[in-house]
Every structure is written in C-alpha cells, then in structure tokens.
Amino acid sequence: MKVSALRRLSVLFVLAVMASCAKDTCPYDDARMCDRDFRDSLAAAEPCFYSLHSVPGEIESGNRVVYSPSEFVDVPRKVLLEYYTGFRCANCPPASATARNIHQARCGDVVLAFIHATSQFAAPLNNHPSGWYSLDLRADESNTFIMDFQLSSLPSGIVNRKQFGGTFGLAAGQWLSEIEAEQAQPAEAFLRIRGAEFEPGSRTMTLQVAYRFLGPDAGDFNLTVGTLENDIIEAQKDGPDDIYPYEHHFVFRGNANGTYGTALNSTSPPLAPGRAVLHEISFEIDEDWDENNLYFFALLNHKDTREVIQADGFFFEP
C-alpha cells in the first residue's frame, strides 16, 4: 500500500510540474492550429456519429450469432484514439480539433474518446465568477489511465494503447500517421456491437457484442465496453481566454465492466464457420448523463499489455 501511495503521489507531482498548458508561443507545428477562426472552420462539419450495423446477423441457440462468411473476410481494423485533455488546459483546443478532424475523415474506422484528466486541468471550480467549470467531466478511470500509461503532459493522445518510440503519449501531429499504420495491418479479430436496448425506468442499457478471433491462437483478451457523451455544454480554456458556451464531444464517462474490461474465453469451444460469440452486458446509465447524446464503444484488448486489437462503436438513438 505504501508503494502504491508513493507512486500515485509521484505521478501527480510530475503532472503538476510538467503538464504546463500555458505557453506564450504556439506549441503546434502548424501554427494555424493556434488561430481559433482557422480551427473553427475545420470543425464546422457535424461530428461523425454512426448507428448500429444494418445487417446484424441471426442469433442461434446459446451464445452464438450467425453471419454470412463474407463478414469475416477483409475485416477492417478499427483504431482507438484516446485523447487526454481538460477544460482548463489552455493548449488543448488545437489538439481537440485535430482529433475531431481525424474522426470526421475516418468515420467508422476510428473510435475517439476524450478523457478529461488531472486535478490541475479537469477538476471543477467552485469560485469562478461566472459559475463556469462547475461540471466534473472526469471518469473514475481517468487518473488510473494517466498513471498506467505514464502521461506527463496534456494534451496527449494514445493510439490503441501501444507504445511508439518507447512512449504511449503522442503529440497531435503524430496521431494520424500511427492510426494509418495500425489500419494497414490485417485485423486480428471481428468485433461488432449488434444490438442495444434502453429501459428508461431503471436507466439500464443492454448491449449485444459479437466477436470472433481470426487467428489460430487468440491468446488472453478482455472485452471492454464503455460510454461517451456528446453535446455537453461547459466552458473551455483557450489560450488566455475562457470560451463559453463550448460543446464538449466524445467525453469518456467510464467503462461498464471494469477499467480494462473482463476476460474472454477466446479459444474454446471452436466456432463453426460463419459463427461469432455473442456477449450481452447490461449496466446503469447515470442520471446526470443525457441518454439522447450517448455513444457506446467496445474494445478487444490484451489482458496483460492492454493493447487494443479491435474496436467498434455507435451513437445511440433512443
């Protein structure tokens, strides 16, 4: 316990010292990203939110779903981009625009999560003269992610929870090339959110997730299911200015089945051709979240390394 506590304190100290968001010069290679009008012009299009797949497959008895065998041929490799930010991070809006633009250009191929983190940049304020920055957009997992992936500054992005050049955290200018490199590799698994049902009285969401490993030896993997929320109106620090109202999209609200998901039995029993395993999960939606603006995602990630090998997501429409 003492080691864990010391580790947490040391990480928070590093964040407090190194994660400086206020700089006099533009920190981005493309200086236009520090021009608010230029960023707004890039982000003018509506965010890309996609619905459930139109041909979900048929459920057979047990936990199997039947697809056409063609569904398992040339399966696209979808990529998770986790963007670490905070509404009081003055240098974050340019990186936020980069993340949104990547997602817009690759709709359906990139699952994007904005993870608000650290007390320095994301903790609510109770003394702002306008009452802004009063919402807590952090999830329970946020600080754990910060420590586990050794992030020392914001903004920062992680692609599929992999290390590139010995580090997880990447600057905004590196995201697209690493995403393209990931997508150029053959998919290791099929993953599809194929059904969703919301019960308003109990605020219970039930998702059906189908998965199938495409290699001969899948190894040990977890399935992670999480929630994002869009159209949250709050303030945002942008250089020396406070912007209000500001629409926060892709806000990570938390995972439904643990920080890094739950273990899957990936190798047995063997699947017949055209079959995938069907996993159903139910969880409660927080009363403060707007069910009309929720986005759900599923990940297949290595149990030990946490590296993501496949992702899927959709915008829920009650």
Image (tube, helix red, strand yellow):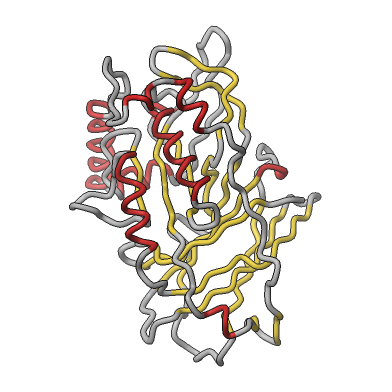
Residue sitting at x 37%, y 67%: 302
Q: Relative to 129, say whether 212 is above or below.
A: below
Which of the two residues, 81 or 44, is positioned nearer the viewer here? 44
Residue drawn at (68%, 77%), measured in percent from left and top?
A: 57
Q: Is residue 149 left or right of residue 315?
A: left
Residue 297 appears in the rendering: yes
Query: In this view, which residue lies farthest toward the top?
Result: 129
In the orientation shown, which residue stands out farthest toward the right? 201
Q: Nearer the viewer, residue 114 or 138?
A: 114
Q: Position of residue 178 (x, y in %)?
A: 32, 53
- The location of residue 237, given as percent across then percent down, is 45, 20
The reply, left or right, for residue 234 in relation to residue 268 is: right
Q: Is residue 93 above or below residue 277?
A: above
- Residue positioned 49% across, 24% down in the render: 124
The x, y position of residue 268, in whole percent, is 47, 88
Residue 151 versus residue 275: which sits nearer the camera? 275
Q: Is residue 120 visible in this depiction of the protein?
A: no
Q: Is residue 263 above or below residue 270?
A: above
**Of 140 and 109, which appears nearest the observer?**
109
Q: Residue furthest left?
A: 166
Q: Is residue 46 left or right of residue 114?
A: right
